[in-house]
Image (cartoon, rainbow, N blue to C red):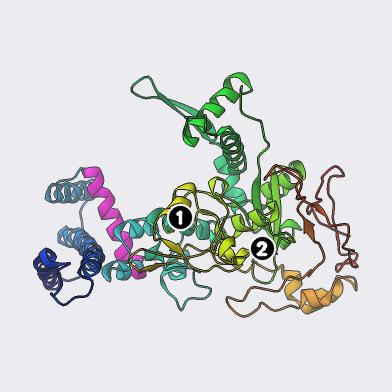
Amino acid sequence: MKGTTAVEALDAIKASVAALAVVIPGAGSAGQEDPDPLRHQLDGWLDTLAEAARLQAATAALVVHAAAGFADSTRAMASPNALPQGRIAQEMAVVAEVACVLAVSERTAGALLAEAHELTTTLPLTLAALQAGNISWQHARAMVDETASLNPAGAAALEAHFLDPDAPNPAQGCPAGELVPSRFRHQARTWRERHHPDSIERRHTKSALDRRLEFAPDRDGMAWLSAYLPADQAAGIWDRTTTAARAMQGPAETRTLTQLRADTAASWLLGGRTDDAPSPSAQVLMTVPVFSLMGLTDEPAMLDGYGPIPASMASRLMAESSTSFHRVLTDPRDGAPLEIGRTSYRIPVSMRQWLRLRDGKCPFPGCTNQSLDNEADHLLSWADGGTTGISNLGQPCHKHHRLKHTTAWTPTGATADMPPGWISPTGRQYASEQQDWEPPDWPPQFKNEARHLELGPDVPEDILSREPPPENLRPVDPLPEWVWLQWPLDDPDPFPPDGLELCPSTAMPEDPLPAWIRQQAPVDEPWPEWGVPQMV
């Protein structure tokens, strides 16, 4: 941005802010004939907030242009024959000047200059979205952070995935700017893990060497204890302590869930037991691409509540943890998880697990409460004619479950693949975050028709030759009515560990994949889930 253009942009923003300031005193005012003046006033204040946020983003873009322009102009004025020590001193002077102008620390000024350089040289779509007010400064910083270790092509692909609707396989769900920055960072990190040029196996092996447990004293007789662990171990510990803490809640229990979780973990670590809490096994969902499980590709699996994990970790968990980790295979055509069956009006464990796969967290916009802490809920109540099906179920956290039943916040309809959105008391509609499933990578030998024939006649040709379905169309269950699940109605426990059993009245048809995959499962497992498939 040239100097004249920068001045013009600054004048335009000043004029916009001044005009908005004039309007604000009467932002909710309505004429005497307005049928609902209070509603008009509410809408006016919300419109003012939205416009102020867009102006704030545009101002942040101007700061980026100004910081990058100042640094570039200073370098242009420097002598081309300057020694390295002179260049370092010049960079220090630039940082100090920006820090003084903005009245911030030199560390903050240095970070701003680095971010401004990346946005003006590497991330044009991000800067354009910021300048248009479509994303906030926090979103832009998250994009800079998540593209830091990518090459230029990878950085361009990441920002195009989230900011260019015409890009191949764009992000699903609500636009990036409608996600809170922390959730946008999570989605960007997930995409980065899937598409990073370095294998996730190699990066995980290197990072695992840094695992540690740290102790940090704090004031008021308190301290912090933190652990840096492989994701599967951390997720299992969190899930197990949360389940035990929830089991201790009741009318006579005054401690919050957060306090119970901390007390449970401390008791287990210090004494190996708790006085009141049960010691449940972890119940963590893990979504695994079929070809990755078979060892044909190295695609990462998805750990519920965390994100991508190496395929080797997923295979090890399935081999060693028959009850703690629930395995869900994804369809090789588009990456969507295969349906989990159900035949009861009650909400069985299998349907709750499907909700965890679909939503990943509380579906209320901006909420980061993970699936384990949430409560299955009928969007349209049973008394009002609602049914017990995936499209009429949500899993809000306790706070937003209460919000739904005590205020005018109303969830919108859901589908088998998309969580419900929300309508506010003022009538505004807000979309929920959606899982960003991606089509898996097919193994090279399956892409070549000649190679298909070499695999032998037992490989189902109709499966190997399938083309991906149309965009945004969820595939039909490839095993319709193959397995039916039955919920034992006389079981008083809503979350029994063996609450699912094969329905004796339903006969199993012939295996649709004969002699291709041999399924292995522990003999004592009440509901034999998928074991590690092996090529026969």
Q: Quadrant of residue 278?
A: top right
Name the residue rendered at 34%, 21% in the picture.
220
From the viewer's perspective, tell me whether residue 96 is left or right of residue 414: left
What amino acid is at disc 1? His
Q: Is residue 119 above or below residue 319?
A: below
Magenta stretch, residue numbers: 106-125
Q: Quadrant of the N terminus?
A: bottom left
Compared to residue 147, the image places residue 315 above or below, namely: above
Viewer-proximal residue, 510 or 192?
Answer: 510
Q: Position of residue 99 (x, y in %)?
A: 17, 47
Q: Classify mark 1: helix, strand or loop.
A: helix
Work out whether residue 114 can be spotted.
yes
Crowd tier of the residue under label 1, counting other residues whose Cα lies within 10 Å: few below 14, some 14–19, many 20 or above: few
191 sits to left or right of 139: right
User: Which one is in front, 387 or 99?
Assistant: 387
**Residue located beneath label 2 in the image:** 337
Q: 72 or 420: nearer the eye?
A: 420
The number of numbered badges drawn on the structure is: 2
**Residue 350's quadrant in the figure?**
bottom right
Looking at the rendering, in which quadrant would you find the C terminus? bottom right
The stretch drawn in magenta includes residue 453: no
**Label disc, if present, on residue 405 of the rendered structure:** 1
The quadrant where residue 493 appears: top right
The answer to whether residue 147 shows anywhere in this view is: no
Give the percent coordinates (x, y) of residue 307.
Answer: 56, 52
Mark 2: few/some/many CA within 10 Å (<14, 14-19, 20+)? many
Residue in view at x 59 percent, y 51 percent: 304
Instruction: Residue at 84%, 45% (x, y): give it.
Output: 522
